[in-house]
C-alpha cells in the first residue's frame, strides 16, 4: 500500500491533504473533526490583530452551477477570522497538543509594519504550531486596508514582510500568493528573495459571479449592493495549475517547495498538482461543498492510483510533469494528428459536424448514402481536437498520430522533431543555424 505521508519543509503530515485557510479551519471544533475525518493538516483561518474584523451579516457567498446544480465556481466576500486572537491562539495550542502528528500551520495577516509582525509572531510560535502561512492574497475587505492582495501585488512588500517573519520567528514560512497579478513569477521570486521556505497558491481570484436582474445588484448582495469577492472551486484549477507550473519551471524559483491550492476536489486533482512539483495540496471549496469526509475518496483514490503505477511514496512522482511544461515555440510541429470517430460508439447527434463545419475546418461529414453519418475527412482535418471536446460520448472521438504523408498538405511528415524557432515562416528563423534548444530547468522535485 502506497505511503501517503509527507514532509513539507520539515512539517510532517500523514497525507498531503491539508485544509486551506478558510471557514473549515476557523475553530477548534472544525479542526478536530477534520483530523478525525482523515485530513493530514490544516492551515488555520487567517488570524489578524485585535479588535477582530467584522463580517457582513447577510449572504457572503455566490456560485456558478453546472448540470444538476453541481457547484463549479464559488465566490465569497468573507474576511479573515472574526474571532479574537486570544481565542484562536488558545484553540491552536490545544489542537496541536492533541494532534502532534498532524500539520497545523497558522495563517497570518497584519498591517504592513514590522512592529505588527514582530508582536504577533512569538504568540503564534508559543502555541506549538508547525509553521506560518502569510496571507498576501485576500482580494477583498483586507486589501482596502493595505493588507492581503494589496501586499501580494507588490513584490517589494512581499520580500520585506517575508524577511521580517524569517527574522522574528523560527517557524518555517509559507508565502501564500495572490493570482490577481499579471505574472506570478515575480511575487514568487520576491518570496524566495525574502527567505520564504515555500509558497502556496492560489488564493481567490477577484470576481463578480452574477448580477441580479431584478434589483440590478451583484450577488451576493447586501441591502441592494454588492462588492467583488474571491473566486475558487473547480473552475479555478486550470489557473492554479498554470501558475504552479510557471513557478516550478522558472529558473529563479525552480525547486522552491509549493503547496498547491485551487479547485482540488478529487484525488486526481491532487495528483496533478503533485506531478507539477507540489509537496502538499490544500482544499477549501470541496470540503465546504461535500463535508470533511470528501478526504476519504481523495486518500483512497490517490493510494490506489499510486499502487497501480508502482509509486511507493509521494516523492516517487512529485514533479514528474514539470519538465514537460514548455513554451509554445518548442512544441513539435512535425507531430501530426487526425480525429478518429468510433462508429460503434457514435450516437449520431451531429454535434461534432456542426462544430467543425461552422467554426473549424469543415472536416466532418453529416451524410453518407442518404443517411446521417459522421466521418472525418483527413484532407481537411487540422487535428484541432474541437470535435473531441464537444462530443457527448466519452472516447467516441480520439486523436491519432499519423506518419507518412499528411493528406491535408500533401507533404511528407518528417520523423524528426522541429519547432517554430527554425520554421521557414518564422522571420527570425533564417538567422539560426539550428533549432533553439529548449531551456532545461532543474526538476522541481529535486
Ligand atoms: C469562504 C472562504 C474564506 C476564505 N478565507 C481565507 C482566509 O481567511 N485566508 C486565506 O488565506 N484564504 C482564504 N480563502 C481562500 C482559500 O484558502 C483557498 O485559497 C481558495 O478557496 C482556493 O481553494 P479552493 O478552490 O479549494 O476553494 C477563503 C476561501 C473561502 C471560500
Ligand atoms: S480535429 Fe478539428 S478539424 Fe479535425 S475533425 Fe475535429 S474539429 Fe474538425
Ligand atoms: S459528436 Fe460524437 S456522438 Fe455526436 S455525431 Fe459526432 S462522433 Fe457521433
Image (cartoon, rainbow, N blue to C red):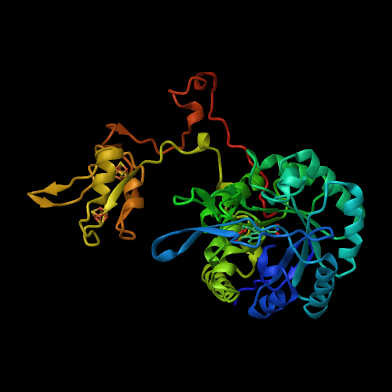
Q: Name the residue nearer the viewer: 12 or 153.
A: 153
- Residue shown at 48%/33% (left/top)? 419
Where does residue 361 sit, x and y in percent of width and height?
A: 28, 37
The answer to whether residue 166 is visible is: no
For this view, does 216 lie left or right of residue 51?
left
Q: Quadrant of the C terminus?
A: bottom right
Q: Name the residue nearer the viewer: 276 or 226.
A: 226
- Residue shown at 28%/42% (left/top)? 356
Q: Name the residue nearer the viewer: 420 or 272.
A: 272
Looking at this rendering, what residue extends furthest in the left direction?
A: 370
Q: Quadrant of the N terminus?
A: bottom right
Where does residue 381 sit, x and y in percent of width and height?
A: 29, 40
Figure disc tally: 0
Residue 125: quadrant of the picture: bottom right
Residue 9: quadrant of the picture: bottom right
Where does residue 393 sit, x and y in percent of width and height?
A: 30, 60
Quadrant holding ligand 1? bottom right
- Residue shown at 13%/48% (left/top)? 367
For this view, does 402 lie left or right of residue 66?
left
- Residue shown at 63%/59% (left/top)? 318
The answer to whether residue 126 is visible is: yes
Q: Name the residue nearer the viewer: 92 or 75.
A: 75
Residue 98: quadrant of the picture: bottom right
Amino acid at each position: 500500500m502506497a505511503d501517503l505521508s509527507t514532509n513539507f519543509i520539515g512539517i510532517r503530515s500523514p497525507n498531503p491533504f491539508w485544509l486551506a485557510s478558510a471557514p473549515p479551519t476557523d475553530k477548534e471544533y472544525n479542526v478536530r473533526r477534520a483530523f478525525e475525518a482523515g485530513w493530514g493538516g490544516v492551515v488555520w483561518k487567517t488570524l489578524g490583530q485585535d479588535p477582530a474584523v467584522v463580517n457582513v451579516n447577510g449572504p457572503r457567498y455566490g456560485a456558478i452551477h453546472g448540470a444538476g446544480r453541481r457547484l463549479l465556481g464559488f465566490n465569497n466576500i468573507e474576511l479573515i477570522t472574526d474571532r479574537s486572537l486570544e481565542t484562536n491562539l488558545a484553540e491552536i495550542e490545544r489542537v496541536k497538543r492533541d494532534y502532534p502528528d498532524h500539520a497545523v500551520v497558522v495563517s497570518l495577516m497584519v498591517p504592513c509594519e514590522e512592529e505588527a509582525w514582530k508582536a504577533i509572531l512569538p504568540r503564534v510560535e508559543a502555541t506549538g504550531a508547525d509553521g506560518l502561512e502569510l496571507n498576501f492574497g485576500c482580494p477583498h475587505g483586507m486589501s482596502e486596508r493595505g493588507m492581503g492582495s494589496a501586499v501580494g501585488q507588490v513584490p517589494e512588500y512581499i520580500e520585506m514582510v517575508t524577511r521580517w517573519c524569517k527574522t522574528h520567528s523560527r517557524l518555517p514560512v509559507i508565502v501564500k500568493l495572490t493570482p490577481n497579478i499579471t505574472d506570478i513569477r515575480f511575487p514568487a521570486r520576491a518570496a524566495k528573495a525574502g527567505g520564504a521556505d515555500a509558497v502556496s497558491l492560489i488564493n481567490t481570484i477577484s470576481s463578480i459571479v452574477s448580477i441580479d436582474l431584478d434589483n440590478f445588484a451583484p450577488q451576493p448582495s447586501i441591502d441592494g449592493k454588492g462588492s467583488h469577492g474571491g473566486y475558487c472551486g473547480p473552475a479555478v484549477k486550470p489557473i492554479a495549475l498554470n501558475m504552479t507550473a510557471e513557478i516550478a519551471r522558472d529558473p529563479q524559483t525552480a525547486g522552491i517547495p509549493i503547496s498547491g491550492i485551487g479547485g482540488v476536489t478529487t484525488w486526481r486533482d491532487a495528483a496533478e498538482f503533485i506531478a507539477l512539483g507540489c509537496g502538499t495540496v490544500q482544499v477549501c471549496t470541496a470540503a465546504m461543498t461535500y463535508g470533511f469526509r470528501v478526504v476519504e475518496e481523495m486518500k483512497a483514490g490517490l493510494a490506489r492510483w499510486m499502487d497501480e503505477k508502482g509509486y511507493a511514496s509521494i516523492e516517487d512522482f512529485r514533479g514528474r510533469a514539470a519538465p514537460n511544461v514548455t513554451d509554445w515555440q518548442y512544441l513539435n510541429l512535425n507531430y501530426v494528428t487526425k480525429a478518429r470517430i468510433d462508429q460503434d460508439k457514435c450516437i449520431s447527434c451531429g454535434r461534432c459536424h456542426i462544430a467543425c463545419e461552422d467554426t473549424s475546418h469543415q472536416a466532418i461529414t453529416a451524410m453518407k448514402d442518404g443517411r446521417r453519418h459522421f466521418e472525418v475527412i483527413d484532407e481537411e482535418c487540422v487535428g484541432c481536437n474541437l470535435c473531441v471536446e464537444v462530443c457527448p460520448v466519452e472516447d467516441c472521438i480520439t486523436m491519432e498520430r499519423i506518419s507518412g504523408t499528411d493528406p491535408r498538405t500533401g507533404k511528407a511528415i518528417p520523423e524528426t522533431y522541429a519547432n517554430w524557432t527554425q520554421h521557414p515562416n518564422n522571420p527570425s528563423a533564417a538567422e539560426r543555424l539550428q533549432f533553439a534548444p529548449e531551456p532545461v530547468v532543474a526538476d522541481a522535485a529535486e
